[in-house]
Structures are given as structure tokens and as C-alpha cells.
Image (cartoon, grey):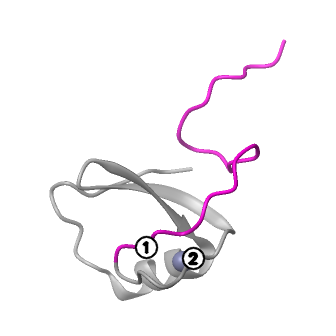
Amino acid sequence: MMKDSVRWGGTPRFRKERCKNPWDGRCGRDDIALYIFYNGERVPICRRCWSRIANRNIEWGEDLEKIKR
Ligand SMILES: [Zn+2]
């Protein structure tokens, strides 16, 4: 039996979501790599932005929590 619960840690399949990188508001790509929590909201981040975020070591604030895949 398949587990069908919707939780963090997966690629969204049934809902197209667009990147809402808080550091790049104009991105809007839909190849979401993961989600982060930013100011208490779940924010989808695309692969490109994620690699940039990871490389640049942006400071993770108190309200920003990385969600591991
Ligand atoms: Zn992006």
C-alpha cells in the first residue's frame, strides 16, 4: 500500500509551484528542488536558486529552516 501523505521532502507532482526564492523575487522557475521555511511560510526553491543559495552561504535567519529532502 502506498503512503500518500503529503509531507516535506519530495518533489511536488500534482501542483505546479514556482520558485519563490526570497533573495531573487524574479526567478519563478518551476523545477522546484526543495522547500524552505521563511518567515513561517513554506517557500519553494528551484534547483538553480538552491545551488546559488548553497554556494553563497546566505545567512539562515531564525525563521529560516532548511528542509532536507
Ligand atoms: Zn529560483
Q: Which residue: 15% across, 56% down?
A: 62
Which circle marks residue 28 in the picture? 2
Q: Which residue: 61% across, 74% down?
A: 47
59 in relation to 66, above or below: below
4 in relation to 67, above or below: above
Q: Quadrant of ligand 1?
A: bottom right
> For the residue labelled by badge 1, is the local secondary structure a helix, a strand or a loop?
loop
The kind of residue on which mark 1 rests is: Asn
The kind of residue on which mark 2 rests is: Gly
The reply to whether the residue tagged 1 has its Cβ within 8 angstroms of ligand 1 is: yes
Residue 63 sits in which quadrant?
bottom left
Q: Which residue is mark 1?
A: 21
The reply to whether the residue tagged 2 has its Cβ within 8 angstroms of ligand 1 is: yes
38 in relation to 60, above or below: above
Q: Determine if the magenta segment contains residue 6.
A: yes
Residue 24 is situated, as x and y percent measured from the top left of the image, at 41, 84
Q: Which residue: 32% across, 81% down?
A: 57
Q: Nearer the viewer, residue 47 or 19?
A: 19
Q: Which residues are magenta?
A: 1-22
Name the main secondary structure of what is drawn in magenta: loop
